[in-house]
Image: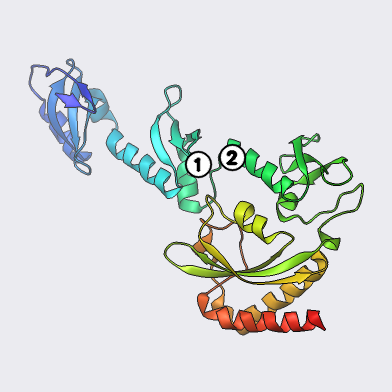
Amino acid sequence: MTIRGETHPIWPGPIQPQWHAAAAEKGYHVLARVKNKDNLALECKECQGTFVCRHSVLTGFQPQCPNCKEARWIADAEANGLTFVKRDDADRHYGHFIVSCGHTKRLQFGRTKKVATEGGEIICERCTLERYKREAQAYGWELVGPDPNGDNDYRLYRHAEGCGESCRVSIGNMKTQRFQCPSCGKGWSNEPSSIYFAEINLGKRTVLKLGFSGNTYSRFEYQLFVRKVLPYRILAEIHFPTGRAALRAEKKVHKRLIERFPDGVVPHAVYRRHLKVKSEIYRPELRNAIFAELAEVEGRTST
């Protein structure tokens, strides 16, 4: 008898009535005695899959169908953009998964379930390191290594295209370029920046993104998206002499939009699996209103 890819011999002997009763009560059918006198072949009523179980476990406990369990692992993996490969040989609480980038990652099943149900992100460490390098290079910096103070939210960077000095910078600030070099003072607040207006295709729906950045291309190609760059189109861009001026103007536009069109704001739950932001996302119906707001901003900056 072939069960889960393995062939087991049928064991002669009667199937006891209490085994049938226990199986029926716990969601299974007893098909046969297999391997030896202690084991039964059970069929799951829910998934119709079969597995081997000791009759003492069947009568004394609630057996878990490995086929149903594996189906849940696969479903949780797919919800996270992962592909389930196999259970870990050394620890039954872990499995091996292929991340969207193609790399394989060992993860706890509990973690994949939590992220699938509560939200979050499962990252590939190798790809994350490469992303940190690209984010730094886009702004003229070089990733040197881990934070010397041991803070996981920081890294050590060198101002490669500036003064050449090294300093600690938070990962978030390097990504958004909102920091200044403590040595030479060069940074986002006194560097040219832009307000951008973009349309993003999330697959099942299109949303609008209004934000500011010192490098709009880098923002969309390396920073904004959770797993992969989705189709997007820059609809408008207004340039400012400094990041501080761009941020101030952008905040005013957001405030007016939220006050005028509270229902035009897209809930975070809609895009949390796609975008690494928690706000500043609007419905397509606000396109003309946003264009009008930006026209006013551009008019003020040109005078």
**Is 210 positioned to the left or the right of 266 in the image?**
right
Q: Which residue is mark 1?
A: 101
Q: Residue at x 63, y 78 (%)?
A: 258
Please name whichever residue, 72 or 243, is drawn nearer the observer in this view of the structure.
243
Locate residue 149, reporting x and y percent: 81, 36
Please name whichever residue, 270 or 297, is drawn nearer the observer in this view of the structure.
297
Query: Which residue is situated farthest in the right direction here?
Result: 184
Q: Which residue is mark 2?
A: 127
Q: Quadrant of residue 189?
A: bottom right
Residue 65 can be seen in this image = no
Q: Residue at x 47, y 43 (%)?
A: 100
Dot 1: what SS?
Answer: loop
Locate residue 276, reporting x and y percent: 60, 56
Q: Residue at x 76, y 74 (%)?
A: 249
| Circle 2: residue type | Cys
Colour approach in the figure: rainbow
| Circle 1: residue type | Cys
Image vertical order of residue 199 relative to residue 134, above or below: below
Locate residue 137, reporting x and y percent: 73, 46
Residue 33 can be seen in this image = yes
Please name whichever residue, 242 or 27, is drawn nearer the observer in this view of the structure.
242
Local packing at callout 1 (Cα closer than 10 Å; few below 14, some 14-19, many 20+) is some
Image vertical order of residue 2 relative to residue 255, above or below: above
Locate residue 175, reporting x and y percent: 70, 51
